[in-house]
Image (cartoon, grey):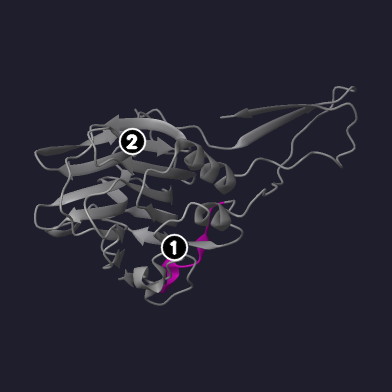
Amino acid sequence: MNTHIVSHRWVWTCVSSAGLLASATSYSHASTYQAEVLADNPLIYYRLGESGGSTATNLGTHGASGNGTYTNFAAAAFGQTGIPGGGGDTAVQFDGANDWISSTFDVVSTGDSTVTLEAWVKLTADVTTNGYAVSYLRDNQNNRYHAIGVNSSEQPILSQDQAGGGGTATGSSALVSGEWYHLVAVFDASPSPDKLYVNGTLAASINGPNPDSATRRFYVGLLHNRSGGTGWFKGIIDEVAFYNYQLPESRILAHYNVGIPEPASLAGLGISTTLLLRRRR
C-alpha cells in the first residue's frame, strides 16, 4: 500500500474570545502565477490555456519560435480547470496513449547546460505505467534525456539518461488523484546531484549527468528519446516551463505558493479577538 501525499491546502483555524470556530475558503493572490514565472525568464512557458487548435503558445523568451504543437488531442481535452492560482486559465487532459506536445526548437544553443523543468500535474485515474509530464531530449544520437513525471505506483519521479549510465530518483509518497502537484526538476551538467522538488520541497536526488553535445528538444506528455515516444502521461497538465539554468529553491517555492495560494484574511466574518493558526499540510 502506498503512502500518499496529503492534500496541499492551507488550513486556518479561528478562535474568538467566545470560543467560536470558523474557517475561510476564499483566496487572495499576491501575484499572478504568470507574472511569477515570467519574472524568472523561462525559455519556454506553456500555460496550456488554448481552447483548441494545434499550437501551444510559448510566453517564454524564445517567443513564437518556441511554440509547441498539439498532436492527437480530442476537442474535449482542452479547457480543463487549471491550478487554483492560475487566474482562471485552463489546462489540458492527456489520455496516456498517444497525445503529446512537441517543440522542435533547439532550447539550449550551446553545450549541455544546467536546466530546470517545471509542470503542474493532476492524476485523474489509476496509473499503471510510468508517465512523463515533461521531457528534454539532450542528445538524440546517444539517447540522452531528462524527464519528470510519475511511476506506476503514482510516485513522482525524475529520470535521466547520461553518458556512462543514468537512473531515476523517486519521491517517497504517492500522489493523490484529483489533487494538483507542482513538480520541478533541476538537472546540473556538473557532477552535482539532479534534484526533484514536489510542492516546493526537495523530494529526491540523483547524481547528475556528464556533459553531452545535445539535440535539446522539449516535449510535454511523454518521454521522448531517439526511439520516439514512450511513457505517455495520463492526467491533466498545466503551466509548463523550461529554464536554461538552475531555478533557485526559493523561487521554486514561490511558484508553488502562488499556484496554491494561501487563504484570504478572515476579516469581515464578524469575529472579534481572533487568533489565527496557520499550518501547511
Q: In 3D space, how far apart are the residues under numbered discs 2 and 1 (Cα atoms)?
A: 23 Å
Please report the residue visible at 58 percent of the width from the left and 46 percent of the height from the top: 258
Residue 69: x and y in percent read 33, 71
The residue depicted at 16 percent of the width and 39 percent of the height is 166
**62 is within the stretch colored magenta:** no
From the image, tell me which residue sits under label 1.
60
The verdict on residue 78 being magenta is yes
Say which amino acid is labelled 1. Gly
Q: Determine whether 270 is above or below 87 in the image.
A: above
Res 236 quadrant in image: bottom left
Q: Quadrant of the N terminus?
A: top left
Which label sits on residue 206?
Answer: none
Is residue 263 shown left or right of residue 75?
right
Residues shaded magenta: 75-83
Is 157 left, or right, of 56 in this rendering? left
SS at mark 1 in the image: loop
Which of the two residues, 115 or 3, is positioned nearer the viewer here? 115
Q: Nearer the viewer, residue 51 or 163?
A: 163
Circle 2 sits on which residue? 195
Residue 126 vs 89, above or below: the answer is above
